[in-house]
Amino acid sequence: MSDGSDAASIRQSAVPAPRGAEFPLPPAAVPAGPHDGDIADGLEETYWSVYDGAASKATVGQILARLPRIVRQIGRLAWAADRTATLAVVVLQLASAAMTAFGLMASVAVLRELFAEGPTPDRVRAAIPQLAVVVALLSARALLEAGVAVAQARVTPRIRTALECEFLTLTAHVRLEVVDDADWHDEAYRANDRGLFYARQIVGQVVSLAAALLGLVGTAGVLGVLHPALLPLLLLSVLPVGAAAVRTARARFHSFKRWNTLQRRVRVFSWLLLERDAAAELRSDTAQGALLEEHRRLTTRIAEEDTRLGVSSAGLNLVGRAVGGIGTGITYTALGAMLIAGWLPLAAGAGAVLAIQAAQSSLTRLVDVSHLVYEQAMWVDDLLAFQERCRTLQPRRSGAPAPETVKTIALDDVSFTYPGKDTPALNGISMTLHAGQTVAFVGVNGSGKSTCARLLAGLYEPQDGGTVRWDGVNVLDMDAESLQARVGCVLQDPVRFPFSALANLTISRGTLTEADPQRALDAARASGAEQVIAGLPGRWEALLSKRFRGGQELSAGQWAKIAVARGLYKNAPVLLLDEPTASMDPRAEHAVYEAVLRDNPRPDQITVLISHRLASVVACDRIFVFDGGRITESGTHQELMDLGGDYAAMFTLQADGYRAGAGEAA
Ligand SMILES: Nc1ncnc2c1ncn2[C@@H]1O[C@H](COP(=O)(O)OP(=O)(O)OP(=O)(O)O)[C@@H](O)[C@H]1O
């Protein structure tokens, strides 16, 4: 051990020099939110709003050109989800459109009887059978539409469930380094948040689109039967209505985008004001007022946007109706001329008026829904493209399963760079670990310890030709997930599974329902989780989450013990402990190390311990010191102390701290 003056000089060399003045002062006014500049502008550019307002930018031609593909795509999804229900939707929808057309023809027949020569009572009596037909057809249409709604209600949730299951299966299995990629994460969030949501909505919209289109075709057919010259007349009447509907739909989508942007921002503030995790800090920072002020400012803007949208919609509707009115005026004038010229009987003229009105309302609906479908299809496309991408990012499923036991793991020239990073996290690491050994990884923050552990766990794969071999077999020749099943990992920030205490252990063996009671008890004893679980009402069955009724709250240290128990319960040939005791009290930490590292050495297990508290690694068989992604020193504690390098400097610094504290206390 070095004397005091040596320790002081080592300490001085180990402590990094203070940063120079190159780091600029922050501005005096804090930007209010997660995005600089104007709120709406900042949020509009976020990854998740990429397709918001797409329908307001697309031309009518673009929308029309895409619609058939969208309908085919949704049809395929529906067909795969439920063939019978999909077929029912199509057949019933067609039948309902036919009923509408026949209903119109029957109405013309009623009018013909009413406009015929003769006394009024006779004319009314003569019209009664045709009236009965109209009523029967309308009733049949109502029944068919109800049938469409029932079939649609069957198929829609199935599409959503099928897509959601596929989405989660694919994303939950992608390789770990993919999840580290911020772009992938953004896409996953977007697909989950929007794609799945709109996938459910779009089915109903496509059905409405088909209904509106069939309605339009049906009325055109009726007009063609009444008189072919009525068809150009229909065009004259519906075109201005269509143009007005396009304008209104665009304005609505544009405004919706702005509204949505603000709404998302408001949710951030409501979440912060409500969320349990933020509650303590919010109060201690006395920040409620500041957040409420921001919330109020945004909700005021939303209210303004709502009013603006309402006023502009009213204006656009008025213009639309005026334009439509001109079209209708021209149509009716032409219709009148045809009647005067005797081209058309009066009853057919009245029927034409009914048909034109029906066509106008079908067209308005068609324009509205096609904009909606166009925009929603962007999100659904996005989801499907993301799923395709995830299919190419799955772990290796070829190769033999990893062996149940391992004697030696050898890393040779292993390098690894995280996606999007320029500098490697690991750079030419070589080491050999033997069963029965406990090794430690130490080093400054960011030196590559956890990355190396994850490579050992098969969670990452070596790049640039480096190899990891289990008993001589390259891990790249093994099934990736079977390899991961052979490594128990306890991480510094363990997942707090909102399940029972027992399920929090069994999950490490891939099950929430089947337990090995003796193994669970042994793991709980060795980790110190036994006392935690014993103190819970319900013990093993206690639910570890306050989010649910009857759930229990654990402290960070208690969660750490559960996490260690989980790692031990896995009973794998390799156990990685990545700063598992950082949040434990000193006695609990000591107990874990005693239990895991000293009392319970397993000749068939390789244990890797990552720790910044160097007192806990003293007893390890070998210590690897990491710096900048390389191993700079390795050996036993004594060998490294004798070397007088970084490890000795760090160890002495920590030991000195305790000694100084003890001196002051004395
Ligand atoms: N998921 C990630 N994505 C991108 N870079 C990462 C990721 N995880 C770690 N890194 C980077 O890789 C380098 C090594 O990180 P690593 O977590 O392996 O260090 P460490 O020695 O375990 O650090 P610590 O002691 O702070 O836990 C660091 O520069 C870090 O910023």
Image (cartoon, grey):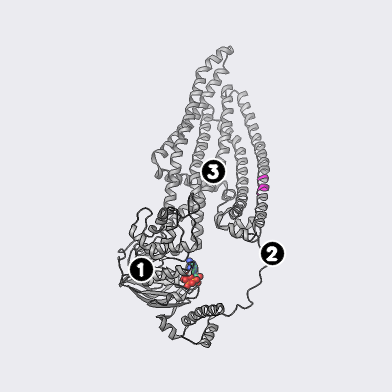
- What amino acid is found at the position of numbered circle 3 in the picture? Ser
Q: Residues within 10 Å of mark 1 (few under 14, many from 20)?
A: many
Instruction: Give the secondary structure at mark 1.
Output: strand
Specify which label sits upstream in the sequence, 2 or 1: 2
In the foreground, 375 or 124: 375
Instruction: Give the secondary structure at mark 3.
Output: helix
Instruction: Give the secondary structure at mark 2.
Output: loop
**Is residue 305 on the magenta stretch?**
yes
Mark 2 vs mark 1, foreground winner is 1
In the rendered structure, the answer to whether residue 358 lies left or right of residue 499 reads: right
- The residue under label 2 is 29
Q: Which region of the structure is painted magenta?
A: 302-307
Residue found at x 46% / y 60%: 495
Specify which label sits upstream in the sequence, 2 or 3: 2
In the foreground, 348 or 525: 525
Callout 2–callout 3 Cβ contact below 8 Å: no
**Is residue 575 on the magenta stretch?**
no
Q: Which residue appears farthest toward the front when viewing the image?
A: 666
Structural distance between the alpha carbons of marks 2 and 1: 52 Å
Structural distance between the alpha carbons of marks 2 and 3: 46 Å
In the foreground, 627 or 498: 498
Specify which label sits upstream in the sequence, 1 or 3: 3
Q: Which residue appears farthest toward the right when viewing the image?
A: 28
Q: Say above or below: 542 vs 556.
A: above
Q: Which mark is residue 370?
A: 3
Determine the main secondary structure of the stretch shown in magenta.
helix
- What amino acid is found at the position of numbered circle 2 in the picture? Ala
Mark 2 vs mark 3, foreground winner is 2
- What amino acid is found at the position of numbered circle 1 in the picture? Val
- The residue under label 1 is 574
| Residue 633 position within the rendered picture, expressed as x and y whole percent measured from the top left | 43, 81
